[in-house]
Each structure stands twice: as C-alpha cells, then as structure tokens.
Amino acid sequence: MLEAKKLVKYYTMKEKSGWFARKKQQIKAVNGLDLTIKRGEIVGLLGVNGAGKTTTIKMLSTLLAPTSGTLSIDGIDALQQPEAIKRRINMIAGGERMLYWRLSARENLMYFGRLYGLRGSALKNQCDELIKKVGLAESADRPVERYSKGMKQRLQIARGLINDPDYLFLDEPTLGLDAPVARQLRGMVKDLAKKKNKGILLTSHYLEEVEELCDHVYIIEKGHLLLHDTPTRIIQTIVKDRILLVVMDRLTQEDWTWLRQELDNRGIHTQKNETDEGTQLDMTAPFDLTAQFIALTHQRNFHLLRLESKKPNLEDAIIRLAEERELL
Amino acid sequence: MNLLNVIWAEMKKSHRHNFNNRLMYFSLFVWPVIQFVDSYYAFKPFNLGQDSPLSRFVPVEKLGLFLITGCLAYIFFWSLVQSAWMMGYEREQGTLEIILLTPAPRTLVMFSRAAANLLEAVWLFSIFAVLTILFMGGLHVAHWWLIPIAVVILMLSAIVWGGFLNTIFLFSRDAGFLYTIFEAPMAFFSGVRMPVMAFPLWAKMIAYAFPLTFVLNILRSIVLDGKNLSAIFQPLLELFLILLCLIIASFILVRYAEKHAKETGNLTLF
C-alpha cells in the first residue's frame, strides 16, 4: 500500500525587484495531504489547474521532495530510501514529451529498460511484450517523431510499464487524444489495476473518465484535501437534485398555469421552453420526480413526446462544489 | 546496476539520437581538420628557424606533430563540452526527469553519457590524426607500448572531464554560458597550439586549471620527446589527482543537483 501522510510542498519563488535584488515568495502547492493507494485499485486525484495534482504526483514519484510529511510504499520509507522505491513505481504524463523522438519505440524502451537494470533476453522480451500490448508492433522500429499523438501516448504507457511497477502514477494520460484511442487507454488502465493488481493514481480533466475508472477520488483545492470518497458517494453528497427532461404537446396557458402550480406545491423547480417539437420542461427536485409528474399528466391527459430522467454525474458534482466554494 | 549495461544504453541512444545524420560525422571531421590546417599555416609566415623563440619550447621540425597531437587531444575534450551542452535538450524534452525517475546511479549515467558520446565524436578525426602522424613521421617513442597507454589516458581523462561537465549542466537551464567559458579558453590555455611553457605566469596558472593541459603534456612527452614511464610519472600522478578531484566533485555535485531539483522542481523549467 502507498501511504502519504500530511504531505506538504512549499516552493520558494524568487522575483526580480531591482537590478540585483530578488524578492522571495513562498508558494504552498500542497498543504497537508493524506492519500492512500492500495494494490489493484484506481484512485482519482481531481482539482482545477494549480490545485497541486502534478506536484503531488511528483512527490509520490520521488521527483520532488516534500517540505514535510511522510511517504511509504509497501512499508518502505520513500523519503529515506528513494532508490528502493524507484523500482516499484513509474509515472506517465500526458503529452508528447519524455521520449526520444529520433529513436524508435523499441529503442526508447530498451534504453529506459537498461536504466532499470534489465538486459539480455529479459529486456528484449519485456520490450516485445509491451510493444504488443500497446499495439505498436507494426511501427516499433519507426522513429517516434513519425508517430501520431495517440501512438506516442501508447508508447508512454509502455515506457511507464518497462520496470513492471507495482504503483503507476498517470498525469492526464488521455490529454488531447481522440475518443477511440482514449477509450483504448482507459481499458488498458482498468486491466492494469484489476488484472495485474497495480495501484494506480490518475489525474484527469475528463471527469467521465475518472467516474468510469476510479474506485475512489480525492478532490483537492490549492493543495488542501476537500473531499475523499467513491465517485458515487461524492455525487450523492454534493448533488442531491434529480433532473427530469420532458417534451410534450404544446401546453395552453391554462394548462401551464395549473401544472406550474402543482409542481411548485411539490417543491419541483421548473423551467419551460417552447421548441419546434412542443413544450419542453426541465424539472429539478431533491427526489426522483418521474412518478409524480406522470401522475399529473394523467390527470389532464397531456400527451408526452419524450421523457428523460437524468442522473447527476461527477462533473455536475465538481461544478456544484466549485460554485459552493466560490460562494463561501 | 551493471556499469556496461548503462554505458551500452547511452551509446545506443547517443548513436541514434545525436549522430542520426551522417553529415554530423562530416562536420566532426572537417572542423578539426580545418583547425589543424589553420594552426599549422598560422605559424608559417613567422621565423621557424633554430633561432626562433618557438624553438626554445618546441623542436621546430616537430611543429606538425605538436599541433596534430594538440588538435587530437582537444577534440576529445571539446566534443564532450558539446555533449554536455546537449543536456539542455534532455531537460526540455522531459527525458532528464525520466532518467532521474529510474534507480540508475546518477554519476554513472553522467560518465556513461560522456563515454558514449566520446567514441562516436572522435573516431573519424582520430584516424585522420594517426594517418597524418604516420605521414609526417618524426615520432620519438621510448617504448611502443606507451602509445596505447597514452590513448587510454587521453580517453579516460576526457570521459572524466565530460562526466564532470554533464553534472554541471544538471544544475541549471542557463549552464550554456559554460560552453563559452570552456571552448575557446580551453583551446588557448591548454597548449593545443602554443606550448604552455611559453605563457606568462598568469596564463600558466589558468592553463593548469584544465586537465587537458596535463593530458597534452603526457601525450607529447610520450610521442614527441620519447620519455619513458618513470619520466612521466610525476605528470601522471598530477593528472591522476586532478581526475580524482573531478570524480569526487562530480559525485558530490550530482547528489547536490538532484537534491536541489527535488526541492525547487527546476527540472521542469526550461
């Protein structure tokens, strides 16, 4: 298990305040973060830009030293024994950097594999297997500079798995990828956790991705932990409203006045729009209002054209949370 | 971690990455040849007789040998200044961060990188230099087995120097100014074209700050002056001490550079 306790990272920034003078300013990137990742689970780390996600990942990867706090991986103190930890972890970032563009996929993997002490047939087999796994077999010997963005990202995944890490940190791994490639990568990430028993930390701006993949999620803001729970419970806790979208034959003024009165009496907030199709109602209530609405339509024989009950998702929850934080 | 494994990794990478274009070899050959020809003919208009001031330090009939050995040793050291300068690319491309993510011993990576780049950068000019030396004649060697020793000394010294420079370039994205410091002053003060003994005292003091000065002293003692092992023992010891200092400094600086990068996060600044 990876366990980070009270992780703090302060950066000291120097800004010019004259010819020779520099003004020091301390920036708190991460402030007392507790985080746990177990083998076989995918953990999400969410927050707006500048929340401290990348700083956290780099501290977990031993690339950054925390200002204070503790970090242990499977009982090994990562701050005291970073070299022992480096064999058990790896990091994959989104984007096209962190690869040698003039080298082929195979050469990149061979190079990084050797830095992990792999050699001979073990290295070759590991590279072949990873190349096959990420679907780059046909272009394995082509220079990376001729790869598409998706191919480079797949190679990044292979590079991140070269040492067969127990824990993998993914920083926006699907950034800028088109839908089919992103879906393929999501499948790969899920397999790594569930079939290969790897502990995975994922940051992403695509919240459907986090909702689909993560067993639990940490939401951070300005380095502080705001919330930690499963995606379902986060949604239930933050967004209590249910939304019902209805399109029906155009309502007369009399029918609308009656319906609005009935909905108001039940605590249902309604918004009406007239469309080419008919009258569209967007209704919001802190309970499932479908049954009640259908009962009302039966009373006056309204003809329903379309009815859609929308469940809130993680994105709704994060937006609501951000709105609430702004109000405070 | 296997030393040869890391060296091999760096060799394969630098071969494919830095020497991708064959024109690179052309430039690595032509530039030093021009430098040698330029140095040789720069002396021609001057008095090169037995009564010339130069003859007090270099036998004038061996001027060609003096210059080609100077150019050869310089190219070994200069190519590694260039290679260290390329660390900026590793920083920019994010590969330096990935190297530091691995458990590979950092000092070993720095020296392996130097070794890998050295062989690739110097082999062509070395062939030219050897052929030129054979063509010019005038070699005065006490024992022929001293020649491979001289080559090993030259290579090891250059690798230590290159590893040290790589380490320095780990510190900052702005280390490029060192290129300016090490390129021309090293060529001048180390006695590549002019004998160090002909320099005034202040210039001699600068000269002995560069390991190339000691290497050239030993190399020329072996191939020009016909000195035996016991005669070059003292400069060898001095060179050994300097290289030892550079290795220890590299070891300390690598640890410090990584610690600094971990505290400031400056590896992502480029």
Image (cartoon, rainbow, N blue to C red):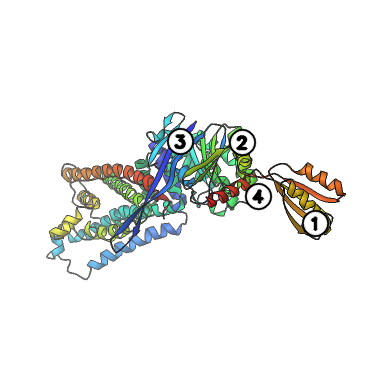
Asked if the residue at tag 1 contacts the one at tag 2, i.e. Cβ–Cβ closer than 8 Å, the answer is no
* Same subunit: marks 4 and 2: yes
Q: From mark 2 to mark 1, how far is it between C-alphas?
A: 46 Å
Letter of the chain that mark 2 sits on in the rendering: A
How packed is label 2: few (under 14 Cα within 10 Å), some, or many (20 or more)? some
Viewer-side label of 3, 2: 3
- Disc 1 target residue: A279
Q: Residue under label 4, please give it.
A: A179
Residue A240 appears in the figure: yes
Q: Give the amino acid at mark 3.
A: Ala
Report the mark closest to the observer, 1 or 3.
1
For the residues labelled 4 and 3, say whether their Cβ atoms are less than 8 Å apart. no
Q: Hey, what amino acid is under mark 4?
A: Ala
Disc 3 to disc 2, how far (Cα)? 25 Å
Q: Nearer the viewer, mark 4 or mark 1?
A: 1
Earlier along the polypeptide chain: callout 1 or callout 3?
Answer: 3
At 28% from the left and 59% from the top, the residue drawn is: B181
Work out how far the residue at label 4 is from the one at label 1, CA to CA, in angstroms. 34 Å
- The amino acid at mark 2 is Asp
Q: Which residue is the site of mark 3? A: A4
Q: Distance of mark 4 from mark 2, alpha carbons?
A: 18 Å
Horizontal side of B171 relative to A306 (left or right) equals left
Task: Name the residue rendered at 61%, 37% in the picture.
Answer: A233
Task: Name the residue nearer the viewer: A106 or A231.
Answer: A231
Q: Residues within 10 Å of mark 1 (few under 14, many from 20)?
A: some
Mark 2 lies on residue: A191
- Decide if residue A267 is on the left or right side of residue B84: right
Counting residues from the start of the chain, the first of labels 4 and 3 encountered is: 3
